[in-house]
Image: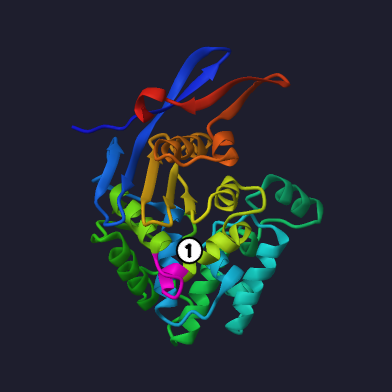
């Protein structure tokens, strides 16, 4: 039986003290699998990597957002002030305020932003939770369609049924399981191959299509799709045509302008190896730049010094 493979080594003071295992798949523009390791044909939860597809379900049902606010609708944002302002703009378009949000209360995702938020006298709030852009867009879409605003997170809500259809359409497969994501909204299980296919479709779509509009919003406003200092934003800024979205539990998906899709999942769910494995996969495809080179390692410290790295497991990517 296929099992997760070693994707990254944990090396401290020249001693390999551990590994990160997982699975990676690359799909061609036609959706077929080009290269894979590990488990890529069994159900998994894409977590927040599903957000662009969720945004597509909303666009199909009248969501009027464009540019940075469309990127925010598909974001796992850092809770920076411009993110909070954007969420409030989306809610205001629906004639609502943040009390309508059904996100969990939380602190900003970004460490420095969180510290400043707390120093400013704030506690946990729904509006700074990283999924609040998506939830605000869900409320706006529901309001425009006269759908119930209190139950928009229910899998049986018309909005969530439309989102499920959009996910299935772009992944080229049926959702195999429905659960509750960390934000309380439904999460729809796909194969890792299906997730890669979807990202390839979005990234290669024409600009006038709804899929292309979402990918272009991410590319043009990567700080709204993630955060000012996030590695996803760095990768999109540095790599022409690349569109990406990370998710919890070590999930990461990328689409390239030619329609190539990439998706990975780390078995242990730790985020530190996520960018390392994606950088190694991009280099295996012949794509590199200074940012990708920098993403090839995650530094490990000992005292005040860097004493090791999480780095790609070379045999896997040869």
Q: Residue furthest left?
A: 1
Observer-nearest residue: 215 or 183? 215
Observer-nearest residue: 55 or 154? 55
Name the image quarter holding the C terminus: top left
* Magenta stretch in the rendered image: 205-212
Name the image quarter holding the N terminus: top left
Residue drawn where x is 48% and y is 53% of the image:
244
Q: Position of residue 59 (x, y in %)?
A: 44, 76
Classed neighbour count for the residue bearing mark 1: other residues with Cα under 10 Å, few (<14), some (14–19), many (≥20): many
Residue drawn where x is 39% and y is 52% of the image:
46
| One can see residue 151 in this view | no
Q: Is residue 145 above or below residue 108?
A: below
Q: Main secondary structure of the magenta part?
A: loop
Q: Is residue 173 left or right of residue 244?
A: left
Observer-nearest residue: 115 or 273? 273
**Can you identify the residue that label 1 sits on?**
215
Identify the colour scheme used.
rainbow
Tag 1 secondary structure: helix
Residue drawn where x is 55% and y is 52% of the image:
236
Is 165 included in the stretch rendered in magenta? no
Q: Position of residue 101 (x, y in %)?
A: 56, 70
Q: Is residue 119 left or right of residue 91?
A: right
């Amino acid at each position: 039986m296929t099992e997760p493979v070693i994707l990254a080594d944990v090396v401290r003071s020249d001693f390999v003290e551990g590994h990160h295992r997982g699975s990676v798949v690359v799909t061609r523009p036609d959706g077929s699998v080009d290269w894979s390791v590990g488990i890529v044909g069994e159900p998994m939860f894409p977590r927040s990597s599903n957000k662009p597809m969720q945004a597509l379900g909303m666009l199909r049902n009248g969501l009027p957002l464009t540019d940075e606010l469309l990127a925010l609708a598909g974001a796992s944002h850092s809770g920076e002030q411009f993110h909070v302002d954007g969420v409030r703009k989306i809610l205001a378009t629906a004639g609502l305020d943040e009390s309508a949000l059904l996100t969990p209360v939380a602190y900003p995702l970004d460490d420095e932003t969180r510290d400043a938020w707390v120093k400013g006298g704030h506690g946990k709030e729904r509006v700074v939770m990283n999924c609040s852009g998506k939830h605000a867009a869900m409320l706006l879409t529901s309001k425009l369609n006269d759908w119930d605003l209190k139950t928009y997170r229910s899998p049986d809500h018309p909005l969530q049924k439309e989102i499920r259809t959009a996910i299935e359409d772009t992944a080229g497969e049926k959702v195999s399981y429905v659960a509750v994501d960390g934000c309380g909204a439904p999460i729809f299980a796909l194969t890792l191959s299906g997730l890669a296919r979807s990202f390839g479709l979005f990234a290669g779509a024409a600009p006038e299509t709804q899929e292309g509009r979402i990918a272009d919003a991410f590319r043009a406003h990567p700080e709204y799709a993630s955060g000012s200092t996030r590695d996803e934003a760095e990768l999109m800024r540095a790599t022409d045509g690349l569109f990406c979205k990370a998710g919890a539990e070590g999930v990461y998906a990328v689409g390239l302008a030619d329609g190539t899709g990439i998706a990975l999942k780390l078995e242990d769910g730790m985020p530190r190896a996520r960018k390392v494995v994606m950088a190694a996969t991009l280099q295996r495809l012949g794509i590199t730049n200074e940012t990708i080179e920098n993403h090839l390692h995650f530094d490990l410290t000992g005292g005040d010094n860097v004493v090791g790295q999480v780095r790609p497991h070379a045999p896997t990517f040869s």
